[in-house]
Image: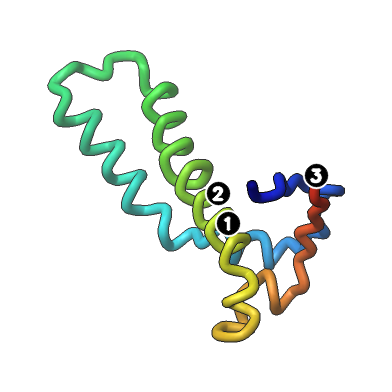
Amino acid sequence: MPALVIPAQPARRHPAAVLELLKPITWFAPMWAFGCGVVSSGRPVGGRWALVLAGVALAGPLVCGTSQAVNDCFDRHVDAIDEPSQPIPYYGIIIPTRRLR
């Protein structure tokens, strides 16, 4: 049975590294898909523009951006060899973990 790994302490953050880690260029597609879904539903938005904007914000930066960061966390050992310019190996973003037995 594999050991459960949990964070031991918060990671050190460098603002440029965090922005690069979230890869803003990848946010466009899910934001566009959400907007297309709103339009194709055929229902009028009416006065619910705040809800539509919240959905776009959730689809792009929060969902897609954090999934990119999680993927980079799992690939950090490979990126240290293959792509040392990636934010985690380059900026030395610490992802401390401890093992529970």
The answer to which quarter of the image holds residue 38 is top left
- The residue where tag 2 is placed is 66
Q: Amino acid at mark 2?
A: Thr
Q: How far apart in space, not on screen, are marks 3 and 2 (Cα)?
A: 28 Å
Task: Determine the residue positioned at 73% across, 48% down.
Answer: 5
Q: Amino acid at mark 1?
A: Ala
Percent of width and height locating residue 50: 44, 23
Q: Nearer the viewer, mark 3 or mark 2?
A: 3
- The correct choice, above or below, for 5 with respect to 94 in the image is above
In this view, the residue in front, 89 or 74, is 74
Where residue 69 is drawn, which disc sits there?
1
Seen as rendered, the residue at the extreme right is: 9
The local crowd at label 1, few if under 14, some if 14 to 19, many if 20 or more residues have their Cα within 10 Å, is some
Tell me the element at label 3: loop
Left or right of 8, for residue 91: left
- The residue where tag 3 is placed is 101
The local crowd at label 2, few if under 14, some if 14 to 19, many if 20 or more residues have their Cα within 10 Å, is some
Q: How far apart in space, not on screen, are marks 1 and 3 (Cα)?
A: 27 Å
In this view, the residue in front, 70 or 78, is 78
Give the image's coloring scheme.
rainbow
Tell me whether the residue at label 1 lies in contact with that at label 2, contact meaning CB atoms closer than 8 angstroms: yes
Seen as rendered, the residue at the extreme front is: 1
Tell me the element at label 2: helix
Where residue 41 is drawn, which disc sits there?
none
Going from N to C along the chain, the mark reached first, 3 or 2, is 2
Tell me the element at label 1: helix
